[in-house]
Amino acid sequence: MMRLRHISRLRALRLALAVMLAVPLGLPGQVSVAAGQSLPPLREVSEIDNGLLWVALADEIRKSCDGIEARMFNALMFLNSLKRTARDMGYSREQVRTYLKSDDEKARMRERGEAYLAAQGVSPEDEAGLCKLGRAEIDRNSRIGTLLKAK
């Protein structure tokens, strides 16, 4: 039997995402907020889209910087809050899964992440810059910073 402490942090984060997707996010076929109103694509729901951007950036920083690790509990809580938001808005599990698995959305999220890094004066290939940014985000207690901690 595998013990949780032996699971890498990345596998634990992936497990958290899988758990998030496994819990139903609404009634099957539910696609409207109110009668006659359809839901916007998840990419247009800034709370969800930006939330996933912050998680992706925190994960990139964590993977690139030996002196920074994930705050797994915070990440799980944040992902659960995104799940609840999507559920409360009426998105189905399949709608969320399609959004998360879409190659187009992944490419768009990468572009958004690179734009954020560029605005901070950091290249995605600059590990020292990513570490410096990560420490700054932790110090600012930003959304990204709340998902990370210095070792």
Image (tube, rainbow, N blue to C red):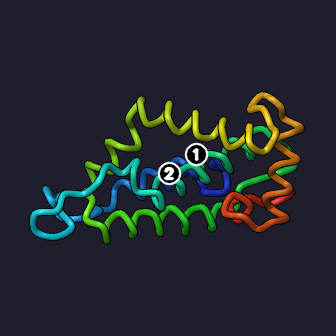
Classify mark 1: helix, strand or loop: helix
Classify mark 2: helix, strand or loop: helix
Image point (89%, 37%), residue name: 128
Please say if the residues under marks 1 and 2 sit with CB atoms less than 8 Å apart.
yes
Q: Is residue 96 left or right of residue 107?
A: left
Question: Is residue 76 among the parts visible in the rendering?
Answer: yes
Image point (40%, 47%), residue name: 43
Q: Residues within 10 Å of mark 2 (few under 14, many from 20)?
A: some
Image point (70%, 62%), residue name: 71
Q: Position of residue 109 (x, y in %)?
A: 53, 39
Q: Which mark is residue 29?
A: none
Q: Which mark is residue 15?
A: 2
Q: Position of residue 88 (x, y in %)?
A: 31, 71
Q: Position of residue 73 (x, y in %)?
A: 62, 67
Q: Is residue 86 left or right of residue 80?
A: left
Q: What amino acid does circle 1 point to?
A: Arg
Q: What amino acid does circle 2 point to?
A: Leu
Q: Which mark is residue 11?
A: 1
Quadrant in the picture for residue 20: bottom left
